[in-house]
Image: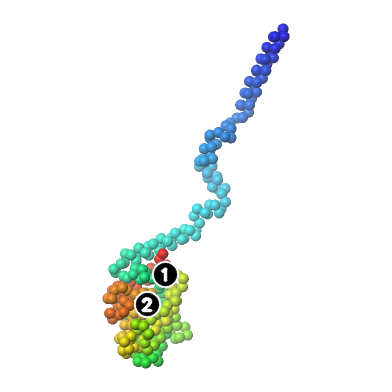
Amino acid sequence: MPERRFSGLMLLLAAALVAAMLWDVLRGGGSPASSPASSVTDTAPPASLAGARAAAAPAASQGATGPPAKEEHYIDLLARAETRRQIRASAGVTYLNEILAISGDSMLHRWDNRITNPVRVWLAPGTAANYQPAFLDAVRAAFGQWQDAGVPVRFDVTADSANAEVVFKWRVQFDIDRTGQTDLTWDQDGHLESGVVTLATFNQLGQPMGPDDIRVVALHEIGHLIGLDHSLDSTDLMYPVAKVRDLSGRDIQTVLLLYRLSPGSIR
């Protein structure tokens, strides 16, 4: 009789254990937190989950991938690259690439929007030895030649000293091998702001300058005044030492290209 009771108890315990196991499984109702499915979700979330995370991200995090300032900078870089391309493509026709190769700042300098608002120039009479009133007409003729070449800048040569942006001065002779000098100022973006042009009444050999000599020197210095530097070709008027007396085709094409491009650095 006791043996039967013991067997019955064992059966009851076994049934209770099985029932407990079944209940534990049914109560869990899903995969444990460390299941492979959860691992995949952590490394590669579904599109809907990824979208929800992006929408919940802080504004600063979203902006870090492409803020407006960077987009504008990229456009500016593209513009500079196009400027460099045009300058390279003009080699032989212009000497703008030569100017930039020897410049210290790789910047284009020019006047901006000075058609309807001419640059104010003071042409003062001189007191230096050999100064002649005809020299002023020679300078005006030099301005006219550049304007006739198509330079999109106008100069008011009737301005007075009080409001002039460009001043012409006279001296007897330079201490070095030159008959003219131009000093310019410009802003950080390459826009020309003012200039001083000094012309000598005697050349470097001590010989007196005539009106047409002054016209040639003024033509060269006005080239600097509108943004050109020296050419390496002696057939151009902008060659450091004057070998010709009028503008060359390259002089004209170089300044026209300069004024089709934006001023400032091309780096």
Q: Which amino acid type is shown beneath numbered disc 1?
A: Asp
Q: Which amino acid type is shown beneath numbered disc 2?
A: His
Picture quadrant of residue 107: bottom left
Q: Residues within 10 Å of mark 2 (few under 14, many from 20)?
A: many
Picture quadrant of residue 182: bottom left
The residue beneath circle 1 is: 105
The residue beneath circle 2 is: 224
Residue placed most toward the observer, 5 or 61: 5
Q: Which mark is residue 163?
A: none
Q: How crowded is mark 1: few (under 14 residues within 10 Å), some or many (20 or more)?
A: few
Q: Residue at x 32, y 70 (%)?
A: 95
Asked if residue 117 shows in the view, the reply is no
Picture quadrant of residue 263: bottom left
Q: Which residue is drawn at 67% across and 18% down?
A: 13
Asked if residue 68 shows in the view, the reply is yes
Label 1 element class? loop
Q: Which residue is drawn at 66% across and 14% down?
A: 11
